[in-house]
Image (tube, helix red, strand yellow):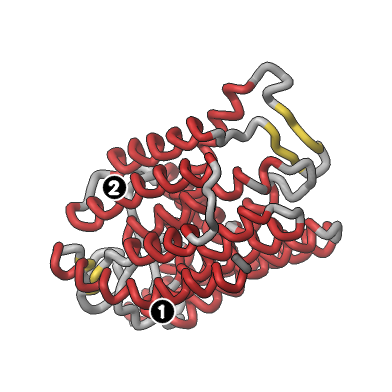
Amino acid sequence: MTYTWTFAIAFIVAILATPVSMKLGRRWGAISYPGGRHVHKYPVPRLGGIAIYAAFWLAVIFLGDWNREIWGLFLGSTLIVAVGVIDDIFELRPAVKLVWQIIAATLLLFFGFSMNHISLPLIGSVNFANMGLAWLGLLLAVFWVVGVVNTVNISDGLDGLAAGICFQAALLLFWSANRIGEVTEAHLTLALAGAALGFLIFNFHPAKVFMGDSGSMFLGYIIGGVSIMGLLKTATVLGLIFPLLILGMPLADLTFAIIRRKLRGHSIAQGDRGHIHHRLLDGGCSQRQAVLILYLISGCFGVAAVLGTLGYWGWATVLLMADFALLLTIIFRRTAFLTAMSRRHSK
């Protein structure tokens, strides 16, 4: 099957399946209500992850013979979507979700997933199996998948944000997989891109549906698993740095959230309104403006990854420094804005 068909099938199925997921969300009580750290103003069904899951796997079915790794992805992603659906309806505790994320990630190990052979810029290829540390490669694989799952999950805070970032990430992973001849991984990433884009039609502001944890955890799980299947097993500098850079924006947000919560003595699983998208909103941006700015930042991280892959590390470094400078500006702009508002009200 051609790449075009893979993308088209996932895209069309997502468009057809998303309204069905909206009806199921209302019927099963999977509704996100306004208030707290939520920024939407009316109840929205949050079971869109079912549509993304269906679109992705229906497109992958047409690939023909599934290898061992695809079966592992299918079983593991089905488990994590089931947990996500339960959470979208009944709201599980963060610790419970984390346990199931670890179980779903560990399931991949039984289907040949490992990070025994990874490559790092300046260091080169590292083979833990040859070093007698095969267990470390397995542990890193679990840590990697769980980390990517939560990285995507934390970005799901504004209409269209997580879906748009994952669409960008999937396209960049496709470019990379196709460049090194990983055909199966290229089809998988295109299926993910098509599913994310089809869902985004309904999820962009003003959102008619949210993907919920069923969607964000599924997207993170597939991105994490596919990057292990292809990019992390190559002997080129595409290895570890490429997937890290294309998720640079949500990774920076996750890192900042962990530091912020630890400094305040809070649990790292405790939600708050300190995320980058909240700071843009508090700085005076509309939802659409905030999402488009974060798309731009995420896209710049992706361009930096491509430049690094092509050997232009100098330009990649400059772009990354500009990206981080913009992120820091956003963080401090919110503080300045709130201080100014406080002074205004005090007068």
- Would you place residue 315 above or below residue 44 in this image? above
- Image label count: 2
- Please report the residue visible at 48 percent of the width from the left and 64 percent of the height from the top: 59
Q: Residues within 10 Å of mark 1 (few under 14, many from 20)?
A: many
Residue kind at label 2, given as amino acid type: Val
What is the distance, in whole Å, between disc 1 and disc 2 at their CAs?
25 Å
Which is more toward the observer, 294 or 77?
77
- Local crowd size for mark 2, using a 10 Å CA cut-off: few (<14), some (14–19), many (≥20): many
Badge 1 amino acid:
Phe
Residue at 52%, 48% in the rendered image: 66
Q: Position of residue 234 (x, y in %)?
A: 73, 43
| Camera-nearest residue between 177 and 58 | 58
Q: Residue 297's quadrant in the figure?
A: bottom right
Res. 62 mark: none
Q: Quadrant of the N terminus?
A: bottom right
Left or right of 119, for residue 142: left
Q: Is residue 334 left or right of residue 342?
A: right
Which element is circle 2 on?
Answer: helix
Direction from residue 4 to residue 347 in the image, left or right: left
Note whether residue 43 is visible: yes
User: Which residue appears at 40% of the width and 39% of the height?
Assistant: 104
Q: Which residue is pictured at 38% across the width and 76% down the height?
A: 203
Residue under label 2 = 83
Quadrant of the rendered structure where residue 213 is?
bottom left
Question: Can I make out residue 224 in this image?
Answer: no
Q: Which residue is mark 1?
A: 204
**Is 262 left, or right, of 7 in this rendering?**
left
The percent position of residue 347, horizontal first and vertical second, equals 34, 82
